[in-house]
Image: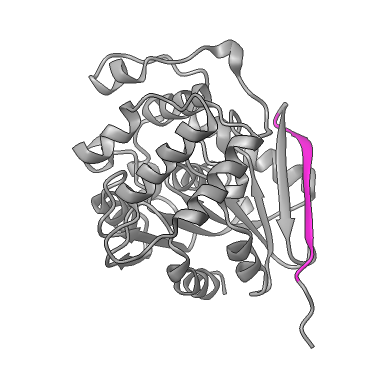
Amino acid sequence: MYEPIPYQGPEIVSANGIQICYDAFGNPNNPALLLVGGLSMQLIGWDEALCTMLAERGYWVIRYDNRDTGLSTKFAEAGTPNIMAAMQGLPISAPYHLSDMAADAIGLLDALGVEQTHVLGVSMGGMIAQTIAINHPDRVLTLTSIMSTTGEMSVSMPKPEGLAFFTAPPATDLESYIQNEINWVKGNYGSGFDWEETAVIQKATATWERGTYPAGAARHTAAIIASGSRQEALEKLAIPTLVIHGKEDIIVPVEGGIATAEAIPNAKLILIDGMGHAMPPELWPEIVAAVAAHAH
């Protein structure tokens, strides 16, 4: 008889000196699987159906808001970095680095009593996940890095058409935020998959109502730039690693995923035709199966 996957949360806990909002799916007695979100991605960016699919594979699935995102602590006193100047090669002052965001994740695990976890990160979340594995290898069972990169600028810069999304003005109301999200999906879904406008509108509305934070996105970007390359550290990594990347990604080009897999000893690489900088629902069964097989 099928037993529904229990859902826990959301809750806010103290972690690494700040407040982190998280929730979880599945049995807490199962091995933990920590989901690390991308730039300005709230925990609800991990669809409940996807989390449930992972939990049904026998994991306690934890998703959370990174600092400066959603309901976690905001660093408003740090100001807004000049990202355009940084992209032109000028020095940037970052209030924190990816290592601090990795420490947030470890603090969350500490608060939840989790000694070791499988870690799965997407985009910037993949960079944070890599940093968790580098800085806290004793806490990581396996690493999965999706549509991410090593931090080497030669393989990490968005394509020109992708860079345009970062220079667009932020939304000022729900209507403009929904339009921005529709534009993002149109440009980044990839040619191999269809998308539903109704679903995009629903997710955008929920995200807006929960609280968007453009200044946080700028500080995330500054953290990425200031943290530099992880290439040498990844070459010394001894954690089983799976790298997944779309061949049509214009935000983090596929070269970034290939470089990640080449840097980490014995990493497995899966390249997906027609996939951009997104994880369409049609891909969830394939991704869930790959992550579960890797974790086992």
* Quadrant of res 161: top left
Horizontal and vertical percent for residue 76? 60, 15
Horizontal and vertical percent for residue 270? 34, 67
Q: Horizontally, is 264 left or right of 161 in the view?
A: right
When the figure is inspected, residue 20 is found, relative to residue 225, above or below; the finding is: below
Q: Horizontally, is 246 left or right of 42 in the view?
A: left
Q: Residue at x 51, y 68 (%)?
A: 291
Residue 177 visible, this orientation:
yes
When the figure is inspected, residue 31 is found, relative to residue 85, above or below; the finding is: below
* Quadrant of res 252: top left
Q: Residue at x 28, y 41 (%)?
A: 156
Queried whether the magenta region covers residue 150, the answer comes back as: no
Q: Residue at x 34, y 31 (%)?
A: 166
Between residue 218 and residue 58, name the one nearer to us: 218
Residue 137 visible, this orientation:
no
Q: How many marks?
A: 0
Q: Give the main secondary structure, helix, strand or loop, of the magenta stretch.
A: strand
Q: Horizontally, is 141 left or right of 231 in the view?
A: right
Q: Horizontally, is 39 left or right of 152 in the view?
A: right
When the figure is inspected, residue 239 is found, relative to residue 96, above or below; the finding is: below
Horizontal and vertical percent for residue 48? 64, 60
Horizontal and vertical percent for residue 160? 19, 37
Q: Residue at x 46, y 50 (%)?
A: 122
- Quadrant where the C terminus sits is bottom right
* Quadrant of res 3: bottom right
Colour theme:
one colour
Q: State the extent of the magenta-drawn residues as a range.
A: 5-16
Queried whether the magenta region covers residue 11, the answer comes back as: yes
- Quadrant where the N terminus sits is bottom right
